[in-house]
Image (cartoon, rainbow, N blue to C red):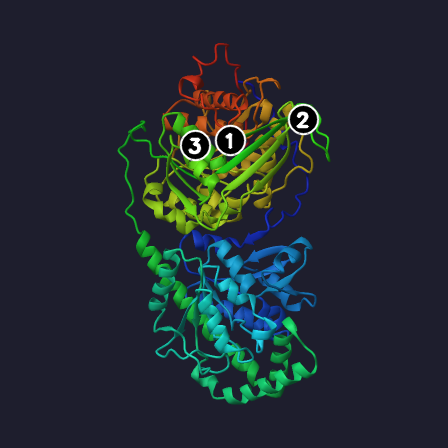
Amino acid sequence: MLRRPAAHLRRCIPASPRRAGLHDGLMSVHPAVSQALADRRPVVALESTIVTHGMPYPHNLNTAKEVESIVRAHGAVPATVGVLQGRLHVGLTGEELDFLARCRTALKVSRRDLPYVVSKGLSGGTTVSGTMIAAHGAGIPVFVTGGIGGVHRDGENTLDISADLTELGRTPIAVVSAGVKSILDIGRTLEFLETQGVCVATYGRSKKFPAFFSPESGYASPYNVCSPEEAAELVASTLSLGLRSGVLLAVPIPDGHSAGGLQIEEAIQRAVREASSNGIIGRDVTPFILQRVSEITEGKSLQANIALIRNNAKVGSQVACALSALSQKKHARPRRTNPEGESPTKHQSNAVVVGGVNVDFIAKAKTEKLLLGQTNCGSVGQSFGGVGRNIADCLSRLDQTPLFISAIGLDAHGENVLTSCKHMNTSAIARLKEQRTATYCAVITEKGELSLGLGDMDIHQQIKAECVSQYEDQLAAASLVCVDGNVPVSTIDYICFVAEKFAVPVWFEPTDADKACKPFLSQSWKALTYTSPNLTELCTMNRALGLPTPAVLPISPDEQINCAAALSRPLLEHIQCVIVTLGSMGVLVCGEHKAPSVNLQPKRPKNKGRLCAVHYPAVAVTGDETVNVSGAGDSLAGGMMVGILRGCDTHTCVRMGLLAARLSLSSPHPIAPTLDLDSVHPLRAHRQPWPEPTCLWMES
């Protein structure tokens, strides 16, 4: 083996670290929130328009902090939602809360506003609908607010209806509120909620529907629930039925603050008349009325407002805790045991792959250079891809039988996907009515280099933790779990939680640079056994951990290898093996040394011996032979996984992956239909002597 100076491993790292970004996506989930969701602990989402528009400073900041404290005191984790400089945050730090509380230019951010605010890098407080979107995206089932919007008076003529109501009709989340403000048309609001299919229940022994400052509005809810446990059962049933609509839990204002309801109601009517005479309309109405009511009642309405928000936070936290207890009880599993020394066979293989599936359209030009703005001569072919699907396909063709968990639309593309995957176990692919099967179009040059890629992959966000948790028994008993970066952060956190609990090895395939950070936004990455990034994705992982990365990636082969080794080193504190794909240069396998290479077989505890990085050159493929570049990395990973599952030595595992990648590059399909065990046998499929890998020793 070649020994290279350890100093080379630090060559590509700048001397002074720069501050890492929150993450490369549009939404950032606070690590405490992410970890709580992974542990199935209760989390309560909180809105931030009460901070930016609901109360004057410093009442707004103090109230927000107090509400978070109430949530914590009742055993849940608070997750205040807001938009800061174009990034949607689920869970805010104290400094971020203070920024929003003082921000004079903060916008009210509803569903319609999110694209603009994000695209312009602006900040704002999320409304009920905006918070519901973020909370649901993060996997939080309970959201606490003061009161929801509704149908405005004369709404039958103006069609002025709050987006909160339509959001409740399409986002499955429980909203805990004090009902609807009496400045609105409460009767028509309840009618509209019924039309949207929203289950409305008053919290308490009465069905009387509250009107924010008043415990009753003159209208009744269809149902009532009397305890946190009963409310949790209602929410759990809604989520389990897959109705894709929410639940509104209407909580009356506490008795001690309801006595002044009549005085506040009179002040509201006066403020409504003033708003009308002053020509105040739209989203400016509610802040104006709340401010005037506070002035007219000499602060009594503000005190009542704070009291009902505190009460809602208490009730919402209790419901979240009861819902968490239901989930924990449902998913309680005994620890599995494995017969010592038993190795996986075809009949015992129980790998699980969780990830995306796409219909791929590959357009290859007949010229080296593409001319933009005009038609280029070339060929267009259709195949089926998606990182998760590709890896599951590869494993299936190499005599494994992985369970593939994914989601497709109830459409023609979805039918075609299932037809093409008949050789795979697709029993865990969900078919969703109102979603499109993911599609991807890649434009490549004559030499096979990617020029442009376009994807319609929103459905991947539906591969949620609650969906994957249906297969927890299979996850807990798996010989290997592979998860790709297409799935939501909360799903990755859940998978890592289960894997750590049951000592199951996990392989994270980053997918692309934007998604590579997902496990590293919390402590979930420490549960990974393997990950297979390219150099750009490896930089993203380091930045997510707040570690320095090179401003410009090196070009020369030696420098790329040294840089990859240096960036892999901090990950090896918890990840057993980092496999860095280097394109035409091959692959760098980093981990604990076990002569003559790196130990790839899963072990506990992880890396305790000397660390090294071993470089394996790629199998040569010419530009003329290259037909498709979309599945080479997935084939490499899948081939290596099969070697690991079969108990092969590291040289054999890596060479199986390299041969699978070569077949992929020469095939119009991401995973070559000709792929089988003979085609990746390092001796039978590759007649020439294999080049000797080289080793770099890493510093302790």
Q: Nearer the viewer, mark 2 or mark 3?
A: 2
Q: Secondary structure at mark 3?
A: helix
Badge 2 or badge 1: first in the primary sequence: 2
Q: Nearer the viewer, residue 73 or 143?
A: 143
Mark 1 is surrounded, within 10 Å at the Cα level, by few (under 14), some (14 to 19) or many (20 or more) other residues, namely some
Examine the image and state in which quarter residue 273 appears: bottom right
As displayed, is residue 336 above or below residue 252?
above
Q: Which label number is shown at residue 383?
A: 1
Amino acid tagged 2: Cys
| Residue 493 point in image, percent of width and height | 45, 48
User: In the image, what residue type sits under mark 1?
Assistant: Ser
In the rendered structure, the answer to whether residue 234 lies left or right of residue 549 reads left
Tell me the quarter of the picture where residue 615 sits. top right
Mark 2 or 3, nearer chain start: 2
In the rendered image, residue 269, in percent from the top left (x then y), is placed at 58, 86
Q: Are marks 2 and 1 in contact (CB under 8 Å)?
A: no
Where residue 474 sits in the image (x, y, percent)? 33, 41
The residue pinned by badge 2 equals: 377
Horizontal relation, residue 463 to residue 113: left or right: left
Is 118 situated above or below 271? above
Q: CA distance from mark 3 to mark 1?
A: 9 Å
- The amino acid sitting under disc 3 is Ser
Does the rendering let one see residue 562? yes
Q: Position of residue 189 (x, y in %)?
A: 50, 73
Q: Give the residue drawn at x 55%, y 41%.
A: 516
Residue drawn at 62 percent across, 74 percent down: 58
Looking at marks 3 and 1 on the same chain, the residue that comes earlier in the sequence is marked by 1
Please state which of residues 205 and 21 is positioned toward the viewer in this rendering: 205
Asked whether the beta carbons under mark 2 and mark 3 sit within 8 Å of each other, the answer is no
Q: Residues within 10 Å of mark 2 (few under 14, many from 20)?
A: few
Q: Is residue 499 above or below residue 673?
A: below
The residue identified by callout 3 is 420
